[in-house]
């Protein structure tokens, strides 16, 4: 386990829209480098960088054309190396984004794989054995290559699935076992890509759709897990300080497979959605636990979380995110104050937390944008970072109509400059919370988590972490709970008081308390 994860606080950077150093309207690596001091000022000591590889950008870079080359629009491999070096001088780690499940259909591997004659890449992707073979349960693209067969896609149609084999083989003529030499070669190719960037200085990877490798497997996905155990064994031997964080959203399984941490994501009806994102957009009804109308149920979240926490204890972590590039920013459903309380809570939780660029200033989800590079409804979460009051909010010196995406320049648009000047801004609040986290191991990744008060459909909820208590009342009403501990207040949004053996939480309050010695 890389030691640095014990106190890691990540900042996710979407390279397209973070900082444009050369005035071409799109963010770049030198721009990111120029903002490392800002990242440090937040208390973030690690970065997750979304894909920066060469790509036709049908899915914003998650369609990799060349795994070994930085996309020209972001700079060069040397620029990236320099970014790693500068970041390390400042004590910042950098995870690249690894896309193991698919490539672009313009990747050299695929261009060779789709040739009719047999070659080294014939088996690198999943192909049926003839073009008339197209079982509808598989996502196949048919009849569009000279090769006599159809190929499977992993996400969008431009992203053919790499071949890691099948667990349940239903069509033996073309479905391979994960131990087939072609599938083994795919895993080895993946490890080589990882080695290349790790040798250049990156500190590990966020792994895209980590659960999507071996096909036809449900539940705990044992064959996909075997691939990751193999990868992890390589890392432990060759790069013991490198970290891998999975997009899987099933921490017990993914950590068991070798990931150091796994994201809680905005999926279906899971615990993360229950906490922060449970809103019916048609009726406007919000049932998120952190919503101010108080309709959430913390016990539904805890049912899932406590089990995951137990299952990962001592082996790896759960990563809470403020948001990511795939999901609407919380400010779409929450007021600034609701978001501030929710974000503060995230940085008081165990595991390795992630802050999505712009959330620290309360950037909005921009409604009504035309899709960009396969963003669709995600596009509004990917707009340029708002730095200051100069043109394009300081993101770029290009003309506004040349920007990758429009920047929010409304009169009420938040910027880092404005947020810096306001002691109560989300920015200054999170700086305090993150600083307190760094000062106290009880509040870091490995610190304990114990439920003190969490009752179905009631507020507040109170948790204990070592000598700290976190009490939260996100609602607009005063809420009370039995609480028998003598404490000092370490940090607070809103305020609380004591009434005999009760803790009385004023509306929209989060309190971090420490046991009196
Ligand atoms: C998950 C990534 O976060 C998302 O942005 C991408 O579109 C898909 N995986 C496909 O790679």
Image (spheres, rainbow, N blue to C red):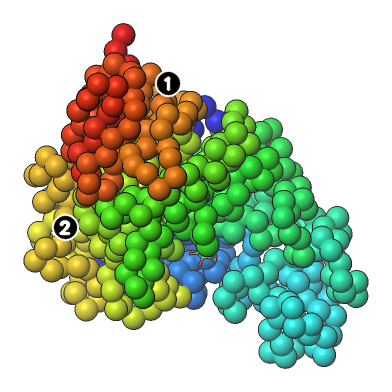
Quarter of the picture holding the N terminus: top right
Q: Position of residue 449 (x, y in %)?
A: 47, 29
Against 194, is 371 above or below?
below
Q: Is residue 308 left or right of residue 56?
A: right
The residue closer to the viewer here, 295 or 135, is 295
Residue at 40% x, 73% y: name it. 377
Q: Is residue 4 left or right of residue 195?
A: left
Against 323, is 411 above or below?
below
The residue closer to the viewer here, 338 or 52, is 338
Q: Kindly state the secondary structure of the residue where label 1 is placed.
A: loop
Which image quadrant is residue 60 in?
bottom left
Q: Kindly state the secondary structure of the residue where label 2 is placed.
A: loop
- Which of discs 2 and 1 lies nearer the camera? The answer is 1
Residue at 90% x, 75% y: name it. 173
Which residue, given by chain and number where applicable, does mark 1 sit on? 466
Which image quadrant is residue 176 in?
bottom right
Q: Position of residue 43 (x, y in %)?
A: 30, 35
Q: Label 2: how many residues lie within 10 Å, few (<14), some (14-19) or many (20+)?
A: many
Which residue, given by chain and number where applicable, does mark 2 sit on? 414
- Per the model, the C-alpha gap separating discs 2 and 1 is 36 Å
Q: Position of residue 151 (x, y in %)?
A: 72, 78
The residue closer to the viewer here, 82 or 129, is 129
Q: Is residue 443 left or right of residue 365?
A: right
The residue closer to the viewer here, 229 or 240, is 229
Against 9, is 391 above or below?
below
Residue 176 seen anywhere in this rendered image of the structure: yes
Quarter of the picture holding the C terminus: top left
Q: Label 1: how many residues lie within 10 Å, few (<14), some (14-19) or many (20+)?
A: some
Q: Is residue 373 left or right of residue 27?
A: right
Would you say the beta carbon of the disc 1 residue lies within 8 angstroms of ligand 1? no
First in sequence: mark 2 vs mark 1: 2
């Amino acid at each position: 386990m890389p030691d640095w994860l014990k106190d890691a606080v990540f900042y996710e950077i979407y390279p397209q829209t973070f900082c444009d150093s050369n005035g071409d309207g799109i963010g770049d690596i030198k721009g990111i480098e120029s903002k490392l001091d800002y990242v440090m000022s937040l208390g973030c000591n690690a970065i997750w960088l979304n894909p920066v590889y060469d790509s036709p950008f049908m899915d914003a870079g998650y369609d990799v054309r060349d795994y070994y080359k930085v996309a020209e629009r972001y700079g060069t491999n040397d620029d990236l190396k320099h970014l790693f070096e500068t970041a390390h001088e400042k004590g910042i780690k950098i995870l690249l984004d690894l896309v193991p499940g698919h490539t672009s259909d313009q990747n050299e591997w695929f261009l060779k794989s789709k040739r009719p004659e047999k070659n080294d890449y014939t088996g690198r992707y999943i192909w049926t054995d003839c073009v008339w073979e197209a079982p509808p349960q598989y996502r196949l693209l048919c009849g569009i290559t000279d090769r006599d067969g159809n190929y499977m896609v992993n996400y969008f149609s431009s992203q053919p699935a790499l071949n890691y084999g099948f667990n349940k083989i239903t069509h033996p003529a073309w479905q391979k076992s994960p131990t087939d030499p072609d599938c083994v070669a795919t895993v080895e190719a993946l490890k080589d890509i990882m080695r290349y960037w790790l040798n250049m200085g990156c500190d590990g990877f966020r792994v895209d759709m980590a659960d999507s490798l071996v096909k036809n497997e449900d539940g705990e996905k044992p064959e996909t897990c075997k691939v990751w155990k193999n990868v992890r064994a390589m890392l432990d031997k060759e790069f013991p300080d490198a970290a891998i964080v999975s997009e899987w959203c099933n921490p017990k399984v993914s950590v068991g497979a070798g990931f150091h941490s796994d994201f809680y994501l905005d999926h279906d009806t899971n615990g993360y959605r229950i906490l922060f994102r449970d809103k019916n957009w048609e009726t406007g009804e919000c049932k998120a636990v952190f919503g101010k109308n108080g309709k959430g149920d913390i016990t539904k979240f805890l049912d899932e979380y406590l089990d995951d926490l137990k299952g990962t204890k001592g082996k790896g972590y759960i990563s809470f995110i403020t948001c990511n590039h795939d999901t609407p920013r919380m400010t779409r459903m929450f007021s600034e104050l609701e978001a501030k309380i929710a974000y503060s809570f995230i940085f008081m939780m165990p595991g390795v937390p992630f802050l999505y660029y712009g959330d620290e200033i309360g950037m909005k989800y921009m409604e009504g944008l035309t899709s960009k590079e396969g963003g669709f409804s995600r596009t509004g979460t990917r707009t340029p970072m708002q730095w200051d009051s100069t043109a394009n909010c300081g993101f770029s010196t290009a003309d506004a109509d040349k920007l990758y995406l429009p920047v929010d320049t409304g009169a009420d648009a938040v910027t880092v400059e404005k947020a810096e000047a306001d002691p109560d801004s989300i920015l200054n609040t999170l700086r305090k919370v993150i600083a307190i986290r760094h000062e106290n191991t009880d509040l870091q990744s490995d610190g304990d988590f114990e439920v003190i008060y969490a009752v179905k459909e009631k507020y507040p909820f109170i948790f204990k972490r070592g000598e700290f208590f976190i009490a939260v009342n996100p609602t607009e009403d005063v809420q009370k709970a039995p609480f028998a501990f003598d404490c000092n207040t370490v940090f607070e949004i809103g305020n609380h008081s004591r009434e005999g053996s009760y803790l009385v939480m004023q509306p929209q309050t989060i309190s971090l308390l420490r046991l009196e010695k």
